[in-house]
Image: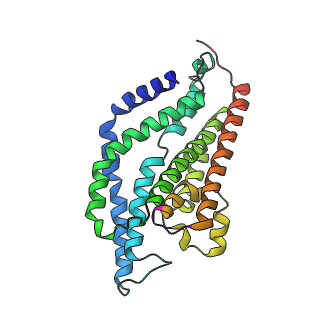
Amino acid sequence: MNKYWHVINIGIQNTLVYRVNFVFRAVFGLIPLMATMFLWQAVYAGKQRGSAIAGYTLGGMLSYYLLVTVVDALTAVTEDDWQIAADIKDGNISQFLLKPIDYLRYRICLFFSARLIYVAAAAIPVGLFIFWHRENFVLPASIATWFLFALSVILAAMLNFFMSFCMAMLAFWVLEISTFVFIVFAFEYIAGGHLFPVDIMPPTLLNVLSLSPFPYQLFFPVTIFLERVNGDSLWRGLAMQACWMGVFFCLAKYLWSRGIRKYTAVGG
């Protein structure tokens, strides 16, 4: 385990080189959030006070988008898939085949080290933004909700990483993975709850989406925090989230093993 702690340490040091970039990304990332919140405030302005849309009051809707920003900062994959694909195309993975280190674990360590620095950089601007909207920010009524939310966030982070790792593994067979990445990102953005709460969709469509991995990447942890899911639905959602994480973990291992058989490197 010492070697992987060393990887985390190196990842933190490398990421700190670009800490200003993380701060600017966090600050300017709030601009679309502000536009979205102003849009929903305008929508609710024409309704009676306390009225709801699909079960969301104005406070609930604004809290949703604030939480999306927080969960996204904790779980999103930024450049890992591109870096992994570049390692494959450039032959950098050859060194990992000759050393006693697992490449998947190596990338997980780098992923969490990058998330750690990004969260630290984004904490102040995002925290100030939430404080500014504190009147509309809904906190959980139960302490247990905080623990379930934390568990769901961890599962979402691992699910996001393994999905991105699987996409990057396509670099063993194709020269450019950008098309596949953008297609998956489009589904994640809509079906994952970035654009709007998934549960405002028609029930039939929502039931279909609940069988896919996308709502469990972002939407599900947010709904746990807002206490919009409970009882059997809560445990079923956590089980689905864990199952999808396991599916993509196994797929990542399989694609890696198949890709290595195809992989060739020259020079040295």
**Residue 228 part of the magenta segment:** yes
- For image coordinates 27% across by 61% down, the residue present is 131
Residue 15: x and y, percent? 38, 33
Residue 201: x and y, percent? 57, 73
Span colored in magenta: 225-230
Residue 62: x and y, percent? 38, 68
Q: Main secondary structure of the magenta part?
A: loop
Up/down of 159 relative to 258, above or below:
below
- For image coordinates 48% across by 37% down, the residue present is 111
Decide which of 14, 156 is in the foreground and name it. 156
Quarter holding residue 18: top left
Q: Please give left or right for residue 21 compared with residue 146 in the image.
A: left
- For image coordinates 50% across by 21% down, the residue present is 3
Q: Please give left or right for residue 22 compared with residue 109 in the image.
A: left
Up/down of 50 relative to 223, above or below:
below
Asked if one can make out residue 78 in the rendered structure from this viewpoint, the answer is: yes
Report the quarter where the C terminus lies: top right
